[in-house]
Amino acid sequence: MKSENIKIAPSILSADFSKMGEEVRLMQTLGADMIHCDVMDGVFVPNITFGIKMIADIKKHTSLPLDCHLMIVNPEKYVEKFAKAGADYITIHYEACKDNTLNVLNQIKALGVKCGVVINPDTDPSLIKDLICHCDMVLIMSVFPGFGGQSFIESTLKSLQYVKKVVDENNLNTLIEIDGGINFETVRLAKKYGANVIVAGNTIFTATDRKDAIYKLRTL
């Protein structure tokens, strides 16, 4: 896959929360394509991060698209607020919505925001086959959501491969995003199996040269 077709989405879960505006501005300066915002409620996942106000506040500091990954129960109650706060993409978990997933995706689209479905490492990707055509982006979790710094789960490459096959067979423009354990080795595998949006947290934010880290993730 050509590097110009790869989008890099730094995850601000790994940023310094005390200077989030500065961190987000820097990511734009260093060549990121979007900002990945991990919203966790402490119920759907065993961690609490940030919510609607954080999205509204960082929106003031960047023109990059805000990619809001909602790891929350009942996302349908909150998507309108996230849209008004400035989310450009809102992705929801199939595991949180199940049979209501399509309704929530349509709710997001009706708000003028791009929508996407997310699956965990142990979710059969065939369960979202009929949803992919309704999505602007599909996010494959390559770790179990909740905390940064986890190791990449290689079995999720099969899910990537499956989604890529569905996208290609139906001539869709759906983006395929990967999130979890992405470093300079695992990013090669992720791209090989179809990912074109790369979420990275620790690999970027702990790097001595963050610009170089973004460049390598895009071009390796």
Image: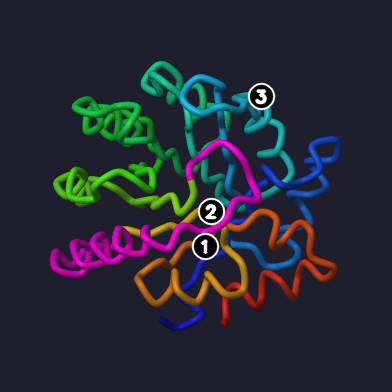
Q: Which mark is residue 110?
A: none
- Image check: 205 left or right of 7? right
Q: Which residues are magenta?
A: 144-173
Apparent side of residue 104 relative to residue 99 in the rendered image (left or right): right
Q: Which residue is mark 3?
A: 53
How far apart are labels 2 and 1 at the CA level? 9 Å
How many numbered marks does the figure carry?
A: 3
Closer to the chain start, of discs 3 and 2, is 3
Could you tell me which secondary element the residue under label 2 belongs to?
A: loop
In front: 64, or 191? 191
**Residue under the image location 49 percent in, 49 percent down:** 143
Residue 198 numbered tag:
1
- Would residue 193 be counted in the magenta stretch? no
Q: Is residue 29 left or right of residue 184?
A: right
What is the CA distance from the residue labelled 3 to the residue labelled 2? 25 Å
Are the residues at dot 1 and dot 3 in contact (C-beta closer than 8 Å)? no
- What residue is at 34 percent from the left and 51 percent from the top? 138
Under mark 2, the amino acid is Gly
Using the image, determine if residue 191 lies above or below residue 104: below
Residue at 65% x, 77% y is 216
Label 1 SS: strand
Q: Is 189 placed above or below 135 here?
A: below
Which is closer to the viewer, label 1 or label 3? 1
Name the side, left or right, on which 193 lies relative to 22. Answer: left
**Where residue 180 is drawn, which disc sits there?**
2
Amino acid on which the number 3 mark rests in the picture: Lys
Say which label, 2 or 1, has the lower sequence index: 2
- Residue 12 placement (x, y as % from top left): 68, 45
Q: Which structural element holds mark 3? A: helix
What residue is rendered at 49% in x and 39% in y? 69
Q: Quadrant of the N terminus?
A: bottom left
